[in-house]
Amino acid sequence: MKVLLIGSGGREHALAWKLAQSPRLTRLYAAPGNPGIGEEATLVALDTDDHAAVLSFCRSEAIDFIVVGPEAPLVAGLADTLRDAGLAVFGPSAAAAQLEGSKGFTKDICAKYSIPTGAYRRFTAVEPAKAYIREQGAPIVIKADGLAAGKGVTVAMTLEEALAAVDSCFDGAFGAAGAEVVVEAYLDGEEASFFCLCDGTHALALASAQDHKRVGDGDTGPNTGGMGAYSPAPVMTPEIVERTMTEIIAPTIRGMAESGHPFSGVLFAGLMITRNGPELIEYNVRFGDPETQVLMMRLKSDLLPLLYAAATGTLGLMSAEWHDDAALTVVMASKGYPGSYAKNTPIAALPHPDADTKIFHAGTALKDGQLVATGGRVLNVTATGDTVGAAKAKAYAALAKVEWDNGFSRSDIGWQAVAREKA
Ligand code: AMP
Ligand code: GLY
């Protein structure tokens, strides 16, 4: 099978690495990719916003299957264009991608199908939003409705913070994404990321992970795209997984099918495990980054037939096998991230990968033969071990060998699981 992978992050490097191991793969292309992905795939300089150009490439190279990594092309309808042309695509339609593209849309599905989530209201004007917040009190959560690169959420511990967040949304801090605001009840508990493949009618549970969204040690500082992750998440016990599948995932799949927009692709549920059980914080319609880096290290099954089954409505026949080992990834980011940072800083050396350590590239490029950092999140140093603690020790040992002066990382990835393992 000839496959085209769309994307250029650490998530796509992990997917490319795993796809490249498939006996069913004949050729892997990636657009636009990065130097790490280039070790697994033929890179194609396609503008993925230009759907006609992507389609024309697929036709000229006789691509059998397209895997779309990031959310932006999905929300923009790339999967629709390709599917309408008769191609097999992993990733939801633009209409189904509203599960990530509009928080209000997802909240309305939750209300209709009694899916556990924080109580909420949607607002398009400042004063009614503020009046509701004053009535509810803090802590309370304010969210820009649309896609805001993970930065549109304020978990306000005080009323003042909550009111200021409403002002900044409606003042255009998140552009069009903030034209509507969702105000949501604060959920108290431990967070987990949970991934399922879906083919429109079936869902196949993959695995769980825990992300570290804050930039600083001890979960301090501003939110980022994710500074590290590990899998599995100990809080996702078999009982919680079962409840998540029946109380959250199954009604969502049914609701989407009933709405005429069946969901196919990967459903990434951001969960809060509260005293009452799993509650939905949000959906994403693509794999997590950096969660995918740890998921792919643990996946024993061939990834390609799984993704293809999700795309072609045959997931009911599939199962996924996992290694018992834990996996952990530490993100190395450019100093200054998630604020502004220097670009094109040289990465002088990377350690050699071995059977249980792997470095996935995100924002890297080759300039005159020199590997340089071009993005905020740049490298994902990933390792497996029989415990999260063991995987963590291996990942940090590899990270110590990365020679990149402008890079930094958190030093405590996995702290929750490691504390549990020691208890
Ligand atoms: P989101 O972009 O919706 O995932 O929100 C970003 C982060 O804000 C989440 O990962 C949570 O840590 C936090 N968050 C979002 N909604 C809530 C909520 N209702 N209660 C508590 N924390 C939340
Ligand atoms: N790591 C969180 C995300 O991919 O949205």
Image: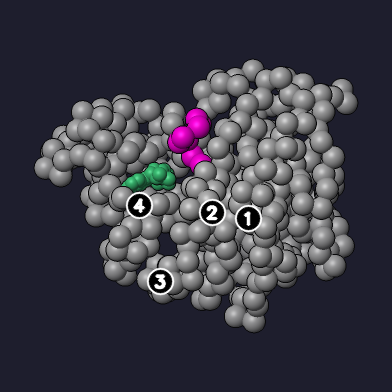
Out of 152 and 172, give the one closest to the viewer: 152
Query: Which stretch did the figure color magenta?
Result: 212-219
SS at mark 2?
helix
Q: Amino acid at mark 4?
A: Gly
Alpha-carbon span between mark 4 and mark 2 = 19 Å
> Going 58% across and 33% down the picture, which residue do you hit?
411
Q: Residue furthest bottom?
A: 317
Alpha-carbon span between mark 1 and mark 2 = 8 Å
Residue under numbered circle 3 = 243
10 Å crowding of disc 3: few (<14), some (14-19), many (20+): some
Q: Amino acid at mark 2?
A: Glu
Residue under numbered circle 1 = 387
* Residue 404 visible in the snapshot: yes
Alpha-carbon span between mark 1 and mark 3 = 25 Å
Residue under numbered circle 2 = 421
Q: In the rendered structure, does residue 285 fall within the stretch colored magenta?
A: no
Alpha-carbon span between mark 4 and mark 3 = 16 Å
